[in-house]
Amino acid sequence: MNVLIVLFEVLSGVLFGSLALLSDAIHNLQDVFALMLSLVALYFMGKEPTPTSTYGYRRAESLGAFIGSLLLLLSVLYVSYEAIRALLTGHREMVGLPMVVVGGVAAVVNGVSAYLLHGDRDLNVRSAYLHLLGDTAFSVAVAVGGAVMLLTGWSLLDAVLTLLFAPILVKDGLSLLVRSARILMEFAPKGYDSRTIAGIISSTDGVREVHDVHVWALSSSEPYVSAHVVLEGNPTADEIGRILREVEGKLKGAGIKHVTLQVEPEGFPCRTPCP
């Protein structure tokens, strides 16, 4: 439904020359793109790793988000440029009626889509629901702007609305760009860092010290951790197993999806300075 609305708004915006409709289409497209990425991620997460792609294709989600956010930001720059040019020349075609009709249809479709997701407790679905509510408000603003244009005859309101929408579009686009770039650059996911992870591991009885801690993510919902763990004394195999199970349980309780630990006895030489 939302893909059709985006196509409808783009075609209408181009046909009638409405920058506000194109801006609303970009805003809707950002959320459609995010939902499509979630579906693509679910598909690729189901594919088995191979000997050459040992992590599978989980980074496809972030790669697609990075490229898509760049394209969306370029689209915002284009419609903003056209809006500024219209204000400088002081001339715009009267597009009030198309804005009312197309904006109204988009508001209804977005509202229905939001209603279909209403009440779901899944965090991803909840996020999509809130985004669709924002899309609905955006489309209502376009329709109201069109009505004001029809009543006042102020054709430049189309360009003014576009520039008012631009900061919101840039903010959303940059947010998606930064989130995807952090995953591709293997930064620690939001809410995690090496010191926090080292603290969780060190709080386990039998652990003397922790070093070479790495925290990264394969996708927006898959934090990974690897670390070297130095154990006290000369623990037996049963004690080592108990310590590893406890550490892994604590990390997974903190939201880590995959844990890799290298166990080292006291005095084991570190390749990097030990803490």
Image (spheres, rainbow, N blue to C red):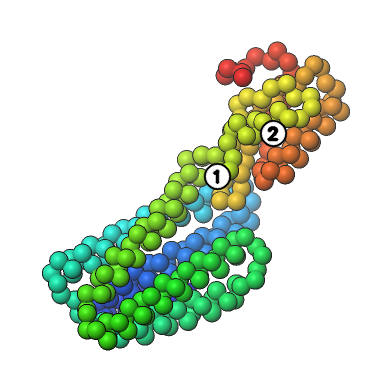
Residue at 65% across, 30% down: 198
Q: Is residue 184 above or below residue 266?
A: below
Q: Is residue 210 above or below residue 70?
A: above
Instruction: Describe residue 263's horizontal placement relative to residue 151 as left or right.
Output: right
- The amino acid type, in three-letter code, at marker 2 is Ile
Q: How dense is the environment of label 1, judged by Cα within 10 Å: few (below 14), some, or many (20 and up)?
A: few
- The location of residue 206, given as percent across then percent down, is 79, 24
Between the C-alphas of marks 2 and 1, the distance is: 17 Å
Residue highlighted by disc 1: 190
Q: Is residue 198 above or below residue 185?
A: above
User: Does residue 77 show up?
Assistant: yes
Q: How dense is the environment of label 2, judged by Cα within 10 Å: few (below 14), some, or many (20 and up)?
A: some
Q: Is residue 104 above or below residue 183?
A: below
Dot placed on the residue nearer the N-terminal end, 2 or 1: 1
Residue highlighted by disc 2: 200
Residue at 43% across, 83% down: 105
- The location of residue 103, given as percent across then percent down, is 38, 80
Quarter of image, res 173: bottom left
Q: Which mark is residue 6?
A: none
Label 2: element kind? helix
